[in-house]
Image (cartoon, helix red, strand yellow):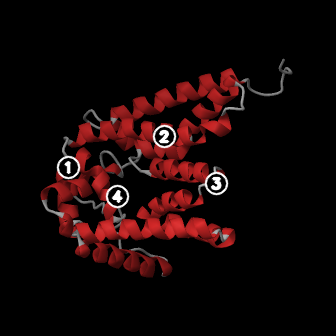
């Protein structure tokens, strides 16, 4: 029995999170209907926020081929063609070439439908990550487990950044969750290979690089190296030019960022 004044009950936390999540989904849905006043209220200058860069990457692969993936002029032209509010803005795809393949099916849809589909997929990806952690949540009483899952679902990088903002941090969550699952299960090779999938954004590897060095588990490192090698091979087979263009973008960004600036336009 709970003590009065000890804090919120799990069912109260679950109810509050469910209401908050429904409000977030409703807000995100408002972006799908003109005149996009809700987007203006959220201070996003363009419809769909960051999802546009991934949609355009898939569009380029579908219509122009992998060699054109990092043609920034083409990216800008396609971005501005998505919505009239994008006429003086730019949003470039700068993640790894292999990640762009994931968004090819989205790019077959009209942009608003693709954005709605992404919101559904983002929730499914959260579920995939939770599925990896389910053995470690099973020991919690059911009300606490439900509250924990709903708290995670309303976590800002999941609910706001991925649903409303169109970002893809939920992909990293699913990857890392399965990496942890494999690692705790003694499958270090699989854990390392899974973590390599985070190379779609090099800053994620900067975060986990020190962990790999401190851990110094040979099987984990071998799996990570094999995973990186496989992703590089797949990317090179698709387009050598795209891989070198991506490396060039990374180095350019690093050089400007080290000077306290970036090469990207102020959008």
Q: Which residue is mark 2?
A: 128
Q: Earlier in the sequence, mark 2 or mark 1?
A: 1
Q: From the image, state whether disc 3 or disc 1 is nearer to you.
A: 3
Q: Position of residue 31 (x, y in %)?
A: 32, 37
**The one of 81 and 51 positioned closer to us in this rendering:** 51
Which label sits in the foreground, 4 or 1?
Answer: 4
Q: Residue at x 60, y 48 (%)?
A: 181
Is there CB contact under 8 Å for labels 4 and 2?
Answer: no
**Mark 4 — residue?**
99
Specify which label sits upstream in the sequence, 4 or 2.
4
240 or 110, which lies in front? 240
Q: Please tell me whether mark 4 sits on a helix, a strand or a loop.
A: helix
Note whether residue 9 is visible.
Answer: yes
Mark 2–mark 1 Cα distance, whole angstroms, equals: 31 Å
**Label 1 sits on residue:** 82
Mark 3 nearby-residue class (10 Å; few <14, some 14–19, many ≥20): few
- What percent of the width, then of the height, locates residue 115? 30, 41
Give the residue displayed 28% in from the left and 75% down from the top.
245
Q: Quadrant of the N terminus?
A: top right
Label 3 close to label 4 by CB (< 8 Å): no
In primary-sequence order, the first of circles 2 and 3 is 2
Residue 105 placement (x, y as % from top left): 24, 46
Residue 150 vs residue 182, the one in the foreground: 182
């Amino acid at each position: 029995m709970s003590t009065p004044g000890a804090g919120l009950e799990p069912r109260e936390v679950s109810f509050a999170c469910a209401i908050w999540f429904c409000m977030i989904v409703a807000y995100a849905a408002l972006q799908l209907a003109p005149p996009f006043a809700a987007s203006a209220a959220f201070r996003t200058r363009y419809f769909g926020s960051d999802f546009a860069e991934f949609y355009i990457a898939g569009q380029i692969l579908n219509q122009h081929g992998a060699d054109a993936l990092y043609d920034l002029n083409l990216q800008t032209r396609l971005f501005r063609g998505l919505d009239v509010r994008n006429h003086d803005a730019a949003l470039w795809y700068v993640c790894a070439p292999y990640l762009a393949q994931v968004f090819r099916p989205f790019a077959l849809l009209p942009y608003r439908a693709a954005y709605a589909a992404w919101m559904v997929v983002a929730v499914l990806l959260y579920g995939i990550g939770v599925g990896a952690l389910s053995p470690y949540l099973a020991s919690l009483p059911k009300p606490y487990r439900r509250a924990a899952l709903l708290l995670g679902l309303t976590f800002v990088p999941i609910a706001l950044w991925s649903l409303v903002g169109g970002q893809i941090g939920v992909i990293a969550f699913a990857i890392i969750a399965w990496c942890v699952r494999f690692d705790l299960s003694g499958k270090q090779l699989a854990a390392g290979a899974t973590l390599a999938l985070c190379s779609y954004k090099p800053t994620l590897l900067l975060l986990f690089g020190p962990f790999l060095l401190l851990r110094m588990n040979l099987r984990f490192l071998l799996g990570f190296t094999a995973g990186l090698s496989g992703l590089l091979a797949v990317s090179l087979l698709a387009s050598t030019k795209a891989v070198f263009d991506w490396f060039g973008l990374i180095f350019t960004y690093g050089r400007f960022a080290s000077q306290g600036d970036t090469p990207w336009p102020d959008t």
